[in-house]
Amino acid sequence: MKKLTILFLMAISLQASAQVTTPLASRRGVGGEAAGYLFAYFEGGGDQNLMEQLRFAVSEDAQNWYALNGNRPIIASDSISESGGIRDPHILRGEDGCYYIVATDMHTYDPKQGWGANPGIVLLKSQDLVNWTHAKINLSKDWSEHFSDAFWVWAPQTIYDRKARKYMIYFTLQRNDRKTLITYYAYANKDFTAFESEPKVLFSAKYGSIDADIIEKDGVYHLFYKGNTKDANGREINNGIQQATSKKLTGPYKEDFKYIDAYAGTRTSVEGSGVFKLNGRDEYILMYDLYSSGRYEYQTSKDLKTFTREPQSFRKDFFPRHGTVMSVTAEELERLQQKWGYVLKHEFESDGNPVIRDKHTADPAALVENDTLWLFAGHDAAGNQTGYVMKDWLLYSTTDMKHWTAYPSPLHIDDFRWADSKQAYAGHVAKGKDGRYYWYVSTNWCGIGVAVADKITGPYKDALGKPLLTNKDCFASKHSWACIDPAILIDDDGTPYIIWGNRECYCAKLKDNMTEIDGEIRRIDVPRFTEAPWMHKYNGKYYLTYASGWPEKIAYAISDNIFGPYTPMGVISEIAGNSNTTHPAVVRFKDQWLFFSHNGGLADGGSYSRSVIAEPMNYDRDGRINFIPATPQGATP
């Protein structure tokens, strides 16, 4: 077959444009020991035309996963497959320093194909995880003598046969008679572009099987698969993940007829089992796709014989379907993120405004602890957006406003199950008297929630399981998005207050537990209040900074009492360039007051693709805030 070089789709982020293509020199790569994991999958949600395409996600602990490239495909299926789609990708680190992917050639969302015949396999090969070559196998055509009736060729996987010194590809086959589901295998040729010989039977389960996954431990090959049990009349009475074992890779495999997954015997169906070993630990994860309920869960084992009974869920910012996981080195993680955008912890330097340039950030909130400034931000999903698409919140830190650390997203809108809006609007983090961190977030019309974490970097969990505040608490408002934009002030005596609102501004005292309102909710009356309140204190007075008018400017007002009355002091920041909105945050950091806001400052920025900026802020001798123009240098020293 003709081999084509495929250039992957470019990510939009500025930092993601760089490439590193150093070939690996060994099985573990030129970066040393394994430092994380790579998850290859296809997507189960969103645009149907983009779902059956290859995606990557990465993790440092195999529990918290972050999609690369904004969960967009890293390669277009119509450029590598006959059908225009791919499913069930399996990724393998080769013995030769290369990487291998095989996938089902299938496009169920094409109305002309659906769940009809799909006798194909897509093969991909790479030296750097970034640039790939591809080939296609059509079993019914390429091996027509004995496989012309191939109907389904599903869930292929690759394993290296040390005895044969070849890569073995195995897959589920159903023929046109639709009677059996049998696992076949064949060896790939040297170029990984075709089978070198006709496939043979590898495993024929008593009642049929799909989605085989083989892993070797202590000289025994464990073949995990989705199996079933039938009664005397041939009616299926149970199904789930099962296991067969063999001392030889090519079999024969012996079934034990036991079900491993926690959902066997229930109405919840699973498939797509995948087993991988945890880095540096004698422990394995068996993960599976709960395809009918939209979940992806796992159980663990130390011997591949007995597994924990209670399933656990991955924390993720995507909706994976049947995929597989491979360990990767720190160098490989870096290379993947250089190509498709950073999602794990990394360092960068800021050269002025915008502060962050590899992502679109909005609605800044800042917290200073000791010598570190922590910047919390909303996340506009992409450039040139025509509406708000915000699914998670971001976190950064610095000790000098030039050298920054970016952290994996600690909070996602899906962490608030009650937030049907699925919109991650502005938030603010404060430290409670108990030493924990509380992240107050707005979810548009669903209300203001609060998440809590023991560490400032998270992970954060919904503290209440319901909103802290809703539109019912906004007694002077009638529109559906009134309950947004929370800000927290911890007063000099340690009393916490929450301020929020759109069109009307509200304020209330919080109880010391940080999750309950203490007393009456009051309205703060200031002129031309639009949204985005922020409260700080200076020389004993309360300074309320807020977005005013439309398009928005930043105005402020001063009071001797947090509940008012407030004296309007005017505008301190003009309209934010090509963004209709702006959002203030004010903190003192190392003897310098700083003013954060956002604009549409990146090349593909705008009202819905914003960027956080920072400027020094100063007062005159009467305590008035001097006007703050937006500058290219910003607050960078």
Image: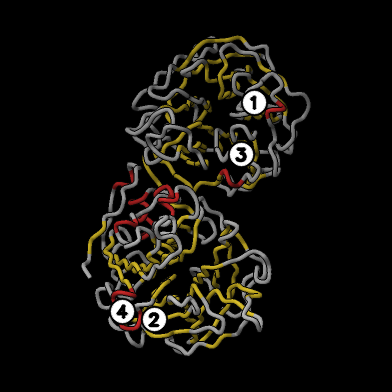
* Cα distance in 3D space between marks 2 and 4: 16 Å
The residue that mark 2 highlights is 185
* Residue drawn where x is 60% and y is 27% of the image: 481
Give x and y (percent) for residue 445: 62, 32
Q: Amino acid at mark 2?
A: Tyr
- Is label 3 in contact with label 1 (beta carbons under 8 Å)? no
Query: Counting other residues with Cα less than 10 Å from the Cα at mark 1, is it few (<14), some (14-19), or many (20 or more)?
Result: many
Evaluate whether residue 319 shows in this view.
yes
Using the numbered discs, state the Cα–Cα distance from disc 4 to disc 3 in whole angstroms.
Answer: 61 Å
Residue 439's disc is: 3
Image location (x, y in percent) of residue 298 = 58, 65
Q: Measured along the vertical axis of the image, is residue 13 above or below residue 24?
A: above
In front: label 3 or label 2:
2
Residue depicted at x 62% and y 40%: 419
For the residues labelled 3 and 2, the Cα–Cα distance comes to 52 Å
Where residue 142 appears, x then y in whole percent? 28, 76
Within 10 Å of disc 4 (Cα), the crowding (few <14, some 14-19, many 20+) is few
Q: Of residues 308 and 543, which is closer to you in this image?
A: 308
- Which residue matches tag 1? 499
Q: Which label's residue is closer to the chain start, 3 or 1?
A: 3
Name the image quarter holding residue 140: bottom left
Q: Secondary structure at mark 4?
A: helix
Residue furthest out toward the right: 519
* Residue position for label 4: 144
Query: Do the residues under discs 1 and 4 have CB atoms within 8 angstroms?
Result: no
Q: Amino acid at mark 4?
A: Ser
Q: Position of residue 115 (x, y in %)?
A: 46, 63
Please report the residue visible at 48 percent of the width from the left and 34 percent of the height from the top: 388
Query: Could you say whether the residue bearing mark 3 is in a helix, strand or loop?
Result: strand
Disc 1 versus disc 4: nearer the observer: 4
